Structure formats: structure tokens, C-alpha cells
Amino acid sequence: MKLDVDALRYLSKDDFRVLTAVEMGMRNFQHEIVPAELVERIAGLRHGGTYKVLRNLLKHKLVHHDSSKYDGFRLTYLGYDFLAIKTLVNRGVFAAVGRQIGVGKESDIFEVATEDGTVLAMKLHRLGRVSFRAVKSKRDYLVHRSNYNWLYLSRLAGLKEYAFMKALGEHGFPVPAAVDCNRHCVVMSLVKGYPLVQIKQLQNPDEVFETIIGLVVRLAEHGLIHCDFNEFNLMIDDDEKVTMIDFPQMVSVSHRNAKMYFDRDVECIFKFFSKRFNISYQEDRDEEDGVEYDSEENGRPSFLSIEKSAGFLDKELAASGFTKRDQDEIEKFIEGGPEPKDGSSSDDESSGKEQTADEDNETVTTKMVALQLADQQVKSSCCNDEERVEENLDS
Ligand code: ADP
Ligand code: MG
């Protein structure tokens, strides 16, 4: 999605006040389409003129107008982007938005620059935007699909990513430095390197391979599984240093499918390295640094041998505002990344991950389906913080 931030400069205080009012109507009053009258009431512009402002927001595609049931508006992703960006700019996190550097299935990534010229990366989460995989038999769900939940889910994904990045960084994992987050937007340090999938040659493929397998194992020792650990989510720089990214789908080793997710993460790496770098793993080792390697499974690290300290990061995660309950909520939607398919690597199209598919009416997503089913839960979990309306409007 193109992010034209020029309009940001031309938007007035009233524009943002009304845009925030639409968000409040969706979030606090749980309207999919917020009645225009409610927008007016929440915004409470001293001299009136909410409708004129709404027309201006509509012109800039920051809101969507819907009069099928009543006269109402909802935020577009662009509108949500603007609110997050403005908040972060106000906080002094960055001062300018630059070019787009990545597009995932569920996110857009841009360069942003701070006042002193430091370039950072900004990830805008876009849950519910694109298909995850075809589940055509469940098509019906699309008909009733709600535009409201993406806002909640994308915010949750952003918070989760930020909290994990921060906690993992504090425990010495090679991840981007977590800078800040707001709504669905996460700001982090820019990784100077390329996704492994783009790397055709390595000086020391064996070393990189060992480092990467070591990472999955160390994560599990810390009670965590990445669940989308593959050549798209590992960045390699010129010195062949590895950085791991993309955390919204991580789960705990106490998850009921933990072993399957762990084995799948490991398998993705084995497959990729054997295919691209012709690495055949040392199959005869059986133990190293306390981790057992399963000779019956061609020398893969054995999940069961890894000491489980499940949930030890809970405290760190909660410190960023991401709770166990948030984790339970988000797991319903993005459990374990792509569907398991005999441990297939993600360069296999069917894994669905990282496809740059546009909205395709023919494809229905498992997440969409889950989204519909959990609609009620989402609604009840959205806080009823009407008293915070004013506070938010003034920020
Ligand atoms: P998604 O969840 O949509 O897969 P990712 O976090 O994997 O999103 O990011 C998508 C792409 O954006 C990555 O493959 C990478 O090329 C780029 N990217 C993401 N984060 C950074 C970063 N911190 N620095 C540089 N590039 C990044
Ligand atoms: Mg990714």
C-alpha cells in the first residue's frame, strides 16, 4: 500500500480530532461503522463543522463512508497509519517517513528518520488484509466479514511484536532494537542486511547454519518458539551476522502444538540450507551443549531434550503491556504462522507466507474465519474506556 504522508502536513488539529473520534467510535463504542452523529458528539468541535472535516478526511482516504444502514464512517488503514504516525512524531520518535523497504503478507515496512538523521524501520501491521491460505470451503465467512476487528488485531500484533522484540533483545538475542510502538505501528532499528532468501552465496554457510539452528534451540530453552522461522525472517549482513525478525506468531513451549512448531521451524532451515547451500547436516552427533540430537530424525535437535522454562519471559513481556491474556487472544488468530505441511519450507508457495497477494475474493483465510468466530470475544475484550476519550483526543 502506498503511504502518502504528504497529506499529514496539511491536516489540521480539527482533522485529527475528528479522525480520532472515528477511531474512538470503533474502539470504545465497538461500531464497525461509526454513526456520523456519534463522531460529531465525540469530537465535540467547539465551532461545529464535523461534517465538513469528515468530507476532507474522505477526500484523503483516511476514512470510508458507508450509508447502507445509516450515515456512518470507519477508519481506513491509511487513517489508522496517520494516527499512529502522528502520535509517534509528537513523541519525538521520528520526524520523517521515507521509502518502503518491505512488504509482508501482513505488514508494510518503511524507513523513518529521526530528527538527528538516524534511519529506523517502521512496521505497520495489517492483519486481515491479505489471504493466508485458501480455505475455499469456508468462503461463507467472508460474506459476513467485519472491517472492525482488523484494527484490534493489528494493534495486538504490534504490541506483541514490540514486547517480544524488547524482551528478546534484553536476553541477548540478535533482533532489531525495539524503539517504540503505538497502535499497529512498531518502530525498531534498521537491520543492515538482506533476508536470507535473497542470499545466493555465503562465505561460511556451515557457520551461519549452525548459528541459526542454535537460535531455534536457544529460543526453546527460553521457553519460546518462533513459528515462522525461515529464510524470510532471518536477515544476514555483509559480515554474515544473523538477525531474527517477525514475532507476532511466537508461542510458548507449553503450547499444545509446541513440538510440531519447533520441528517445523527446524525443518524449514534444514531444507533451505540443503537446497541452497548443499549443506548436509552432521547426522552422527548425539549431544552438544546439553542438547540432544535425534539420530532417528537425521540429526535434528530434539525438542523433548530441551529444558523447558516455559513462560519465563512473561514478566518482561508484561512490562511492555503485553499480557498472557493478549497472548491467548492473538493465538486464536495467528496461531503458528503458516499451516503445517510436512514441514515444508516457506519458499514453497503453498506455505502462503510472504506472498504479495492482493485482496483476492476467491481466497478466504483461516485467520478471517477465526476472526469471525471470535468476533464476540474481541468485542467483549475491548476496553470500555469512555473516560479516556478526552485524553485520547487531546494527545
Ligand atoms: P511480515 O510479518 O509481514 O512478514 P516482516 O517483519 O517479516 O513482516 O518484514 C517484512 C520484510 O521487511 C522483511 O523480510 C525485511 O525485508 C524487511 N524488514 C523488516 N524489518 C526490518 C528491519 N528492522 N530492518 C530492515 N528491514 C526490515
Ligand atoms: Mg516475515
Image: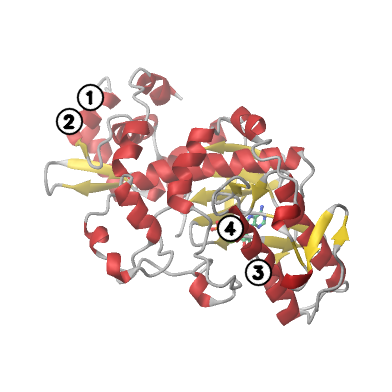
Frontmost of labels 2 and 4 is 2
Please, what secondary structure does the residue beneath circle 1 have?
helix
Q: Measure the alpha-carbon separation of dots 3 and 2.
A: 52 Å
41 vs 160, left or right, is left
Frontmost of labels 1 and 4 is 1
Q: Measure the alpha-carbon separation of dots 4 and 3.
A: 31 Å
Considering every residue shown, the one lying at the far front of the view is: 296
116 vs 136, left or right, is right
Please state which amino acid type lies under the numbered disc 1.
Answer: Arg
Q: Which mark is residue 268?
A: 3
User: What is the x, y in percent for residue 41?
Assistant: 22, 24
Residue 216 lies in what quarter of the image? bottom right
Q: Residue at x 49, y 65 (%)?
A: 339
Quadrant of the drawing holding the N terminus: bottom left
Residue with the mark numbered 2? 37
Q: Which mark is residue 41?
A: 1
Q: Which mark is residue 99?
A: 4
User: What is the x, y in percent for residue 61?
Assistant: 33, 51
As drawn, 79 above or below 212: above
Q: Residue at x 59, y 49 (%)?
A: 250
Q: Measure the alpha-carbon separation of dots 1 and 4.
A: 37 Å
Please state which amino acid type lies under the numbered disc 3.
Answer: Cys
Q: Residue at x 14, y 47 (%)?
A: 67
Please state which amino acid type lies under the numbered disc 2.
Answer: Glu
